Amino acid sequence: MRRYDAGDAIFHQGDDAGGVSVLLAGRVKVTSTTAAGRDVILAFRGPGDIVGEIGAISGGARSSAVRALEPVQTLAVGAAEFRGFLDSHAPAAMNLVLMLIERLQTADEARVEFAGHDVVGRLARRLLELGERFGEPCEDGIAVTLALSQEELAAWTASSREAVAKAMRLLRELGWVDTQRRRVVIRDVEALRGYAA
């Protein structure tokens, strides 16, 4: 069992492969740094998710970094133990394959999305994803309490912070979202879906 405070690194990009971490509590962001030094957010993970599985299986260097967004508790499993478990538990190995397929499909969808949507559309899709994964029903809609800065939203939508601020302002003016400090309330899911389609 391991514990991390908000901002702590769980894995660093380029580190030698090690084991996996099963997230028991708290949420993390998965990032990769471009050759130009810009951080790109690949995903957010929460309780029940596994991180570090590709490096643990392949033995290659870590392709991304994982950092705690809030206090996080994990179960750390060594690479050899993880591979041994998969070898002796076929259903678990198949579930891992299905999880990796889902992540690959999500990555493919993101590439198509970046080519076919403007910043508002990309932001709308990311907000919908946050609502589905981390949202909680509230009086005005769906509250997303994952504390993300505009810089992080920009890194997740392949946009500048200024473009994300402008897009968020438009979504507020349309009445589709409401923002407070590090909190977004999705007020009109169908409108966001329609724009992001």
Image (cartoon, grey):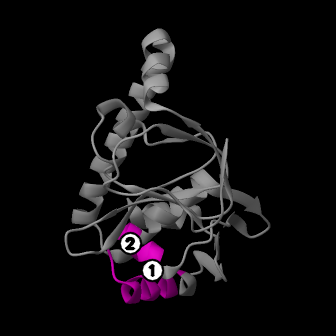
Quadrant location of the C terminus in the rendered image: bottom left
Report the disc number at residue 155: 2
Tag 1 residue: 151
Q: Residue at x 38, y 42 (%)?
A: 103
Q: Residue at x 56, y 73 (%)?
A: 148
In the image, 33 versus 40, the foreground residue is: 33
Q: Residue at x 37, y 69 (%)?
A: 157
- Label 2 and label 1: CA atoms lie apart by 6 Å
> Hey, what amino acid is under mark 2?
Ala
Where is residue 100, by image quadrant?
A: top left
> In this picture, is 174 found above or below 188?
below
Q: Position of residue 39 (x, y in %)?
A: 34, 71
Disc 2 on helix, strand or loop?
helix
Magenta stretch holds residue 161: yes
Where is residue 196, by image quadrant?
A: bottom left
In the image, 148 versus 171, the foreground residue is: 148
Where is residue 24, by image quadrant?
A: top right
> Label 1 crowding class (10 Å Cα cut-off): few <14, some 14-19, many 20+?
some
Q: Residue at x 39, y 34 (%)?
A: 56
Q: Which residues are magenta?
A: 151-171
